[in-house]
Image (cartoon, rainbow, N blue to C red):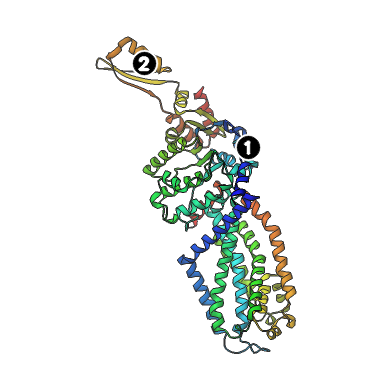
Amino acid sequence: MNAIAHSARIGVQRGLTEFRQSLTSREDVGWYVVTGLILLGVLLLQRGGTVEGTNLSLATLSLPGILGMQLVLGGVIGTGSALVVHREDGTLLRAKAVPHGMVGYLTGLVLGTSLGTLVSILVLLIPGVLVVDGLTDAGISGWLALVGVFTLGFLATLPWGAMMGSLFTNPQAAWGLGFLALGGLVAISGIFYPIQALWGWVQGVAQIFPVYWLGLGMRWALLPESAAVVEIGESWRTLEMIGVLGAWAIVGFGVAPVVLRRMARLESGGAVEARRQKAMQRV
Amino acid sequence: MVTELDTAASSTAAPVVDEVIEVRDLRMRYGATDVLSGVNFKVRRGEVVTLLGPNGAGKTTTIEILEGFRMRSAGEVTVLGIDPATGGEQWRARVGVVLQSWRDHARWRVRELLVHLGRYYEPFSTPERRRPYDVDELIDTVGLHERADHKISTLSGGERRRLDVAIGLVGRPELLFLDEPTSGFDPQARRDFHDLVHRLSDLEDTTIMLTTHDLDEAEKLADRILILAGGRIVADGSAAQLARQVTGQAEVRWSLDGEHFVHATPDATSFVRELFAQHGEAVGDLEVSLATLEDTYIELVQQHETGHPQRAAIAFEEVGR
């Protein structure tokens, strides 16, 4: 047990090291800046006019939802693609070759991707608060609620990202399919426009997945009470939000270890070499 | 923290066994294909043993079973006295695996990664075997001193492989596995690597097991060569023993009064003793050579590649008798 705790501590160090490397890497910083700028551009275009029934602009309603989207992006695609890449390049096999290395690796992965996701959210939130009206009223309780939703949302999405990363073998396929699926969900989850504008059955489908509930949770945290009128049932449905996200987290953390263990068991030098050969052919 | 580590260490006392690896009737089957059909061998403490065989003979499969990365179909395997299939982390800490890096940890610096990976071994340190290795000493051993603070992505292929070896050693393993360690090396890098392995084998009786398909490499590196073909070990011995096993003959060349002679004999030592007894100082240009393994091995590889691994193996064994 002590050796496991020891490895978890090494994993924390690993996550911090990888986060620092990410912040000094041109590709990663470029990615944060470009996505931040694109989303900020969308917000700027949405500033004019107010949403029916409220005195809030579409941008004000969108920003919290976009934060929720960034969170799912980081939790699922960030975690998943890191894992697929680490399986392909042998990082994971190295972790398997040292005692309790998997504990350290997974701790590092979780910490690294959560810090990365936090950055992708702050990159949007900080300028967003300046550009978009109505968010500065959220108050301390609002920001604390935001932290709570962030944590719950990350717990609800992370294990699913890890499972995705365990099942795919090709990083490009994981990215492509992940983005496609997530894009579809974002489109029906009321992120860029109120969900009420969609057909009833689409709303039903959207409410199965965490994207909608994360957007709702973020709006609940940041927007004034009066903005609830554009939501389903004209309510923030906080309990339902916690319930659905909690269910995703519980099921995810129940199933993910089984999937991860199976994946880890199958890692070997031969498996990594085979993937290397395949990757060389792709390039 | 210190007390925790000490507690963990006291339970790590390694059972002392002289047979570091023991493999009995190891079988591996993928679908309907038998890759290994009854492999038997032993490796003793401190030995450097090469598993030699053509590509596709099952060397990687064998070594991965020993590393605990792959399940076997049948047979008995013990590594450091423990079945690798159920080895656990205590066992893992005593085994070093040299993996071939490709582009993993590209953003990490050499020393940074070695320190990080070394820390996993701290709870497994014992008074007799301090774990992990001192990282700077290790970096010097593998000749990466000048690259210690460089990003791994900037290393050349040879440097990267030396880093792989350092990573395999960082836990001060009792047994080190290397799978095709020099594939893709230029001749200079290969030579440097051979020097490195010789230095390693002198370090605190680390047992080394490596695979190669290159006979020349096996002859240069190993105390003992195991040839794997047709799913079995078809030859087992030092390079010299195998050469004799294959040919049964040594070739003796000498000159006597300006005239050159050649004689083939199964017992070169007595022949030469006899020669000197008869002619004394008149003997010149003496040369005793064991016919190399090369011809037999190349024949085996060719048979294997033309799809007759069984025939190749049998041919080798028959010559051996």
* Residue B131 at least partly seen: yes
Residue drawn at x 64%, y 54% as measured from the top left: A260
* A140 w.r.t. B217: above or below: below
Looking at the image, residue A96 sits to the left or right of residue B288; the answer is right
Q: Label 2 marks which chain's residue?
A: B
Looking at the image, the residue that sits furthest to the top is B278
**Which numbered disc, 2 or 1, marks the residue that appears first in the sequence?**
1
Q: Is mark 2 on a helix, strand or loop?
A: helix
Query: At which x and y percent is residue B273?
Result: 37, 14
Residue drawn at x 40%, y 21% as measured from the top left: B250
Residue identified by numbered label 1: B82
Q: What element carries label 1?
A: loop
Residue identified by numbered label 2: B272
Q: What residue type is labelled 1?
A: Ile
* B224 w.r.t. A213: above or below: above
- Taking depth in this image into account, of A140 and B55 the one nearest to the observer is A140
Between label 2 and label 1, give the one nearer the viewer: 1
Q: What residue type is labelled 2?
A: Val
Query: At which x and y percent is residue A271?
Result: 56, 49
* B147 w.r.t. A139: above or below: above
Mark 2 is surrounded, within 10 Å at the Cα level, by few (under 14), some (14 to 19) or many (20 or more) other residues, namely some
- Taking depth in this image into account, of A111 and B320 the one nearest to the observer is A111
